[in-house]
Image: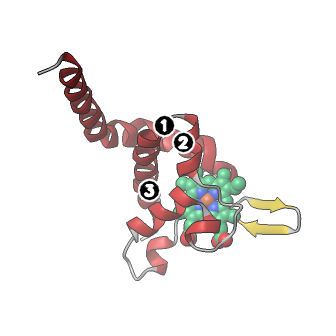
Amino acid sequence: MAIESVLKTGWAVVALLTLLASPVVAEDIAAPSEFQRYCALCHGPDGRGVGVVTEGENTRKAADLTQITKRNNGNFPFSKVAGIIWQGGAVAEHKSKLMPSWGAFYGEQVDPIFAKAMVFDLTQYVETLQDK
Ligand code: HEC
């Protein structure tokens, strides 16, 4: 086996381990602090949507993130919520473009794999905010 392919296999394992490990680590540390850093601005520190976002003529109350499960008959629509966080309001639901695409944000700031892990963790975090 050529040395390059050994190295590639090694990196694939490292990448896989990082992926498997990240939900645990990131859920405990990263997602809650990332939420406070980037989402609280519009959605409020507890996700209840205190902020009002304005861009030109376009004004939108940031969504209350604690009522998603209630609105969905007691089920948290994980993939749908992850899709909105990943794509942003404009693309995902034809909602407001004032909800940014966090997949694009983290993809540019860090890298695409981190972006996926982070959006997954943020979705799990939003799930913990749900009113019963
Ligand atoms: C610049 C303001 C802003 C920031 C920052 C922001 N959002 Fe939003 N978000 C919005 C607005 C406005 C909406 C409502 C869009 C609509 O209904 O048209 C929204 C909607 C959502 C929704 C859909 C809620 C529903 O009821 O369908 C989710 C989930 C969400 N945001 C999560 C997040 C997360 C997680 C972050 C941080 C990574 C974040 N948002 C950061 C403005 C923002």
Badge 1 crowding class, 10 Å Cα cut-off, few under 14, some 14 to 19, many 20 or more, is few
* Secondary structure state at the residue bearing disc 2: helix
Q: Position of residue 13 (x, y in %)?
A: 21, 31
Q: In this image, 95 relative to 81: left or right?
A: right
Q: Is residue 41 visible?
A: yes
The C terminus lies in quadrant = bottom left
Residue matched to label 1? 111
Disc 3 under 8 Å from ligand 1? The reply is yes
Residues at discs 2 and 3 in contact (Cβ within 8 Å): no
The N terminus lies in quadrant = top left
Badge 3 crowding class, 10 Å Cα cut-off, few under 14, some 14 to 19, many 20 or more, is many
Disc 2 under 8 Å from ligand 1? The reply is no
User: What's the amino acid at mark 3?
Assistant: Thr
Mark 1 to mark 3 CA distance (whole Å): 18 Å
* Mark 1 or 2, nearer chain start: 2
Query: Which mark, by number, is residue 123?
Result: 3
User: What's the amino acid at mark 2?
Assistant: Tyr
Q: Is residue 11 placed above or below 29 in the rendered structure? A: above
Residue matched to label 2? 106
* Mark 1 or 3, nearer chain start: 1
Residue with the most extreme front position: 2
* Secondary structure state at the residue bearing disc 3: helix
Front residue (pair 45, 23): 23
Residue ID at (55%, 46%):
35
